[in-house]
Amino acid sequence: MARFRQSEEDDPLTWSVIGAAIEVHRWLGPGLLESAYQVCLSHELTMRGIAHETEVKIPILYKDVHLDCGYRLDIVIPGQLVVELKSVLEFHPIHHAQILTYLRLTGIPRGLLLNFNVPVLKDGMKRFAL
């Protein structure tokens, strides 16, 4: 079982979501599509009593007009945390930029980027804050 050291910047909600993600990864392992991990993580969060939404649309504000550009957040704990899921060989700068942009557009203060395509999930996690 992976262990993480909690620091002052972390919060119980983030740790609960990380625990749920570890459980999903433990059951499924790496190598599946992102959509499989999303459905399973959503189910695990529900089983743990963590209220969340999936596939949340985020409009782009352009010249005072909200435009639907097709952006959807994988999992959101409303007002608290954006969880962006990946199943890739490794994170790239575009993945970091993506979640930071999502935080900026939504005003949600924290984000969690999870890559399920790794042997040990702790090696596929990045936390972000505005």
Image (spheres, grey):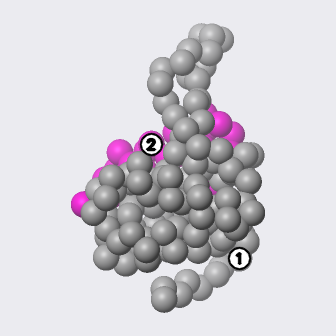
Q: Which residue is mark 1?
A: 8
Q: Which residue is mark 2?
A: 98
Could you say which is closer to the camera, residue 19 or residue 79?
19
Label total for image: 2
Q: Quadrant of residue 63?
A: top right
Q: Is residue 74 visible?
A: yes
Q: Residue at x 64, y 72 (%)?
A: 15
Whether residue 119 sits left or right of residue 47 in the image: it is left
Determine the CA span between mark 1 and mark 2.
25 Å
Q: Which mark's residue is nearer the viewer, 1 or 2?
A: 2
> Callout 1, which amino acid?
Glu
Q: Mark 2, residues whose alpha carbon is within 10 Å: few (<14), some, or many (≥20)?
A: few
Depicted 1 relative to depicted 14: above or below: below
User: Magenta span has 24?
Assistant: no
Residue 105 in picture, x, y percent from top left:
60, 34
Mark 1 element type: loop
Q: Which residues are magenta?
A: 89-113
Q: Earlier in the sequence, mark 1 or mark 2?
A: 1
Depicted 29 relative to depicted 1: above or below: above
Q: Residue at x 65, y 11 (%)?
A: 64
Whether residue 54 sits left or right of residue 35 in the image: it is right
> Callout 2, which amino acid?
Gln
Residue 58 in picture, x, y percent from top left:
58, 30
User: Magenta span has 97?
Assistant: yes
Residue 66 in picture, x, y percent from top left:
62, 15
Mark 2 element type: helix
Q: Quadrant of residue 47?
A: bottom right
Q: Mark 1, residues whose alpha carbon is within 10 Å: few (<14), some, or many (≥20)?
A: few
